[in-house]
Image (cartoon, rainbow, N blue to C red):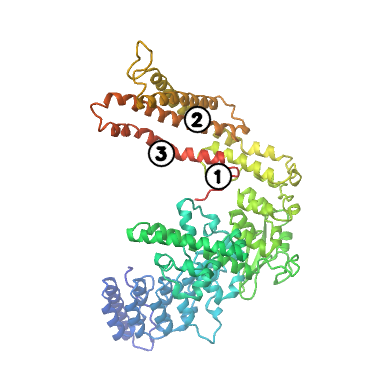
Amino acid sequence: MDPPINADIEIDHHHHPSAELEEIRLIERIAEELFKSAFEDTWNKVVELYRTQELARRVKINKSGDTAIHVAIAANRPDIVTKLVSFVSPADIEIQNDMGNTPLHLAAVVGNVEMCDCIARKNRSLIGQPNSDNETPFYLTALHGKKEAFLRLYSLIEPDRDPYAYCPRKQDGETILHAAIDGEHFDLAFEIMNRYPKFIHSVNEDGNSMLHLLANKPNAFRSGSRITGINELMYHCTFVTGLQQKSSRPEDDRSCSNLCPWNFKRGLTRRSDLRAQPDTESARDEALGDPKNGDSYCKCINVLRCLYSIWNMILYILGFGLIEIQKIRDRKQRHVWSYEILKKIVAEANCYEYRDNGRQPLKLKFVDDQETRPYVVLEGADVGLDESSLDRAVGEGDHDRAILVRTDGTIVQREVRKRESAFLIAAKNGIIEMVTKILETFPMAIRDTDYMKKNAVLVAVENRQPHVYQYLVKQSMKEVTFRATDKNGNSALHLAAALSETQPWRIPGAALQMQWEIKWYKFVKGSMGHQFFVRHNKDGLTAKEVFTIKHEDMVQKGGQWLTNTSASCSVVAALVATVAFATSTAVPGGIDQQSGTPTLENQPAFMAFAICSLAALCFSVTSLVMFLSILTSRYQEKDFGKGLPKQLLAGLSSLFVSIAAVLVSFCAGHFFVLKQKLQNVAYLMYAITCLPITFFALLQFPLYYDLLKATLTKVPQRSYK
């Protein structure tokens, strides 16, 4: 805690100078005593000083300009805060620290409902009091996701005042709804939208609407999260309460109500909850649209949820899986709530307002008709963007000087780039939920372009978003969208041929990345007819030529990676082949001199030895041939598509089998030596002997899995962290 300093207390200059000096010394003594008591956590002394000394209620006790109430709030002592506030006047509670924060600002950051309530009831004007950054306590509750504190402050608003007066914008034009959505506090954002519907249309000075904020958060949606295996089953069977249900039935909003297994009857009795779940995808929505299909779907899901809840009960009893279940539930809750927020914003937002005929966009108001003002802050501090005006203002360049007029009358000039629509950002980030929802509501959004004149198809192809691209392929208006080119004349096929800067294929090894680049290029090329793609761009290059130029470095790196991998594996394969050949020629127990047959041929262990030794020799030679063929390859661009990855996969598979076969043949042949003396521990020793191959397989399995996935996958899938 900072040391105490003198408080800024107004002194009556009509007093005698000695009286003034005495009062200053008294203030210093009180400040020091308050600071010491707060630092030593002896808050009873602070309370006593506030009760007996009127000056103590206005003294700032540290370098940050905090009063004792500020410090008590920061220490999260609601009992002390309540006592201190009871002694101060409404004017004293308005004292701000050096950052302009009143005690209610700090209580809003902490989110303590009791402290917020007692301070706001003392002086309700503090609810809309801005600090130095123009942040009100309302804004801070939204910024930090303190929903209960926000609702309590909202309930204390004076009924005769405009509720929007308590929520001024920040200097950058952000509202409390911006803060809630940007922090992914979707339950609080839902409450804000219900109470402040005008904020749904708000845009800050950077042109970010609520849809823009959501479009930049792919992890908040199901399509941007990678959930596989058992976690996917847990995800689909976990109960999550929707925001509409949560708002209408707050009694259900308990930390364990959606997680505890004894609530599994809800899955059998509350079908309406299932229909209200916004985490459904398009196929599920279609199923629920048909009463017959909806009944079948609900019954199946309810049975699964019932079984899953019983499983959760067992996990609860055993004490396992609680953390993992909670993580899955939190993730699904975020996905469900974000989709509900998306639906509400799309239904009411003005970013994509169209006339009744669905063709001509509505014009936004301007301060004047100058084309140099694509952005303008209207009354209420909303920012509007006229796309056509901005196109003319930008001209051939990417930037233009824009004039922004704030509500306080100040004019700001800045260089701006044509703002991408939320639809294009969602397509770039692969948020298929937002892409489908916007197109369903505003079909003409498919015509949106960015400053490079790229539409949704070009953006999805450039950023390697297969789900978005496949969805757009199924839509109408192919003549318009798929024939489009960007400002440089690049078609979708040209952009598929260009190397993405974001490195979406998170696969180890440049060779596998090259393989998926080839597959993506062929997928885009085969998805539409050749007539939909222009042959040459403005540089006179075809898509094939662009692919060769852009991937030249990746081909070299991929060839080097394959060379190093094959060289290392071929050494191991040659060693295994040598051992396998020597083992296959040695017969345990010898050969009968009269008949020429092995003396132990009727023993099961001998049969295992004979088969495994032959298999080891065969597969080791096969792996050696595969690796040698890779080493002698020309490493042409087309070879990375199928040939080289398949050869590497075949070589690794053969190598694994040959190593395992060599160990089994060794154990089978050696069994005849130890079966008499160490019969009881022989199997344990052989199991220990097989540990090296087990460790080797575990270490190489990730590479083998990625290689297998990259080879068998027809359409490359973008990976997410």
Q: Identify which amino acid the numbered label 2 is placed on.
A: Gly
Counting residues from the start of the chain, the first of labels 2 and 1 encountered is: 1
Q: Which residue is mark 3?
A: 698
427 left or right, relative to 565: right
Taking depth in this image into account, of 347 and 701 the one nearest to the observer is: 701
The answer to whether one can see residue 505 in this image is: yes
Taking depth in this image into account, of 679 and 628 the one nearest to the observer is: 679
User: Residues under labels 2 and 1: Cα distance?
Assistant: 23 Å
Q: Which residue is mark 1?
A: 505
Contact, CB < 8 Å: mark 3 with mark 2?
A: no
- Camera-near label (2 vs 1) is 2
Q: Position of residue 256 (x, y in %)?
A: 40, 67
User: Residues under labels 3 and 2: Cα distance?
Assistant: 17 Å
Asked which secondary structure carries label 2, the reply is helix
Q: Position of residue 233 (x, y in %)?
A: 47, 55
Taking depth in this image into account, of 289 and 321 the one nearest to the observer is: 289
Above/below status of 6 relative to 284: below
Q: Identify which amino acid the numbered label 1 is placed on.
A: Trp
Q: Which residue is mark 2?
A: 651
